[in-house]
Image (cartoon, helix red, strand yellow):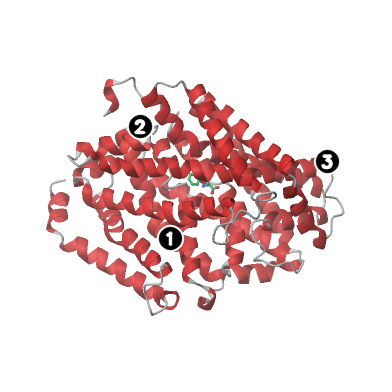
Amino acid sequence: MASSEQPRIQWLGRWGFVLAATGSAVGLGNIWKFPYITGEYGGGAFVLVYLACIFVVGVPVMMSEIAFGRRGRGSPIDAIRRVVNESGRSSVWSLLGWMAMLCGFLILSFYVVVAGWSFSYLWKMLTGSLVGTSVDDMAAVFGANNANPLNLGFWSTLVTLITMVIVGKGVQEGIEKNVGWMMPGLVIMLLLLIVFGMFSGGFGDAVRFLFSFNADSLSSEGMLAALGHAFFTLSLASGAILTYGSYLPKGASIGRTSISVAIADTAVALMAGLAIFPVIFANGMNPGEGPGLIFMSLPLAFQAMPLGTLFGILFFVMLSMAALTSSISMVEATVSWLCDNKGFSRRSAAWSTGIVLWLISTAAMLSFNVGADWTLAGKTFFDWLDYITSRWMMPLGGLGTVVLAGFVLKTETFRDELGLAPLPYTLWLAMVRYVSPLGILVIFADALGVYTVTLSVHWPWLLGILVLMGITGELVSPRLRKALTTR
Ligand code: TRP
């Protein structure tokens, strides 16, 4: 372990970590991406699969990642290597850490473009340029905002700069102080939008769209999207949570912390859905509009409500802040690796990362204007970054994490680190050994078209069988029984 080096800085307390992890989890994923992909994949059934993925796959993966971070006290690469070496396993597993680091970096390079949208809409709100825009013109406004590379590039560059300044300052200074007031603020704004939505005439449709289970609307593609989004929204398999876990003090409970973060994150996403879809339905807009969905709908709500400009400004301030508390977590892994291994100071690590990031994000930004035709298999560069990270890298990284935690490490390692009572520990182990990996594999296989029976119809049965198999498997496992009795 890292004890020979100087002690790693830590969060100020359990709250410091919960705040930072929630700040990382809650972001554009909840407010921008969740509503728009829910719209694209048809609502209720997608939401249900997403919720299942959060709690069946996401929470166990998150617990494992935090445990890896705290046990290994380092960036994903170093932490994983230390923990597997401790169990006498091969350092090759640290490749998972490399993939996570790369993934966080690639995500950030398109994330800053979306965060740039949020900043530019804040500016539009401040200057009043959206006043009087009708439903039909909203798409044109969004399009015009994207059409000029200098405009869009200005905003994404600004986001990159702010991110790097905060990251350069360090974890506690930059992160802990801001999340504490921002999170409640965001929740208040969303509640306000929901209350407004209740009177807008579209609320019933929105609730039905989000919560009525309609199995026909669910495709294999949609299930993979739900799985990928569960990883994205919890900031998993991309180094963020693992690195934050490496700053977690010994005594804090990993299980309780992970569940709180998952619940907070899910609550914000569902609230965002309840805030946005009433506006969509009341105005006869198309829920499958795509990435511009919230930017085309919410300004309409702000125009129609009393004190709308003020609330609109506050909302986009909160959204931009939420984006920043997430963006800083995506480079934390790279920066902490550069500092620990390559002798960089935090500041120079942040700036060097920032320059490379800026180049990639500029290319991603061009996908909305001059580079709109640079496509491969129908996807722009921006689309590819999103697709590769969410559909492939994160689910595969998550699979690697649970296999590592469940089968490769010595059982004692994580039993110590998680510090759970026997029953919750057994449950966690059953999840990481059977339920989560099989869940991920089933969805992958389905997306690759391996089955002839459509899983979208039979998945509740399959899930039930998997859970039962997992539990019985664990109950009869002599190794585990021994582990539990010697505890
Ligand atoms: N979870 C964030 C969101 O929902 C996005 C995010 C932050 C992220 N850090 C990450 C996604 C690391 C993947 C990896 O907006």
Instruction: Compare marks 2 and 3 and give the one earlier in the sequence.
Output: 2
**Of helix, strand and loop, which one carries label 1?**
helix
Do the numbered discs 3 and 1 sit on residues whose CB atoms are within 8 Å?
A: no
Looking at the rendered structure, the number of numbered marks drawn on it comes to: 3
- Within 10 Å of disc 2 (Cα), the crowding (few <14, some 14-19, many 20+) is many
The residue that label 1 is drawn on is 53
Q: Is residue 110 left or right of residue 196?
A: left
Residue drawn at x 28%, y 24% as measured from the top left: 3
- Tell me the quadrant of the picture where the N terminus can be found: top left
Locate residue 322, reporting x and y percent.
60, 42
Mark 1 CB near ligand 1 (8 Å cut): no
In this view, the residue in front, 20 or 130, is 130
The residue that label 3 is drawn on is 127
Q: In this view, does 238 lie above or below 280?
A: above
Q: What amino acid type is highlighted by mark number 1?
A: Cys
Residue 317 occupies quadrant: top right
Instruction: Compare marks 3 and 1 and give the one earlier in the sequence.
Output: 1
- Within 10 Å of disc 3 (Cα), the crowding (few <14, some 14-19, many 20+) is few
**Of helix, strand and loop, which one carries label 3?**
helix
Label at residue 367: none
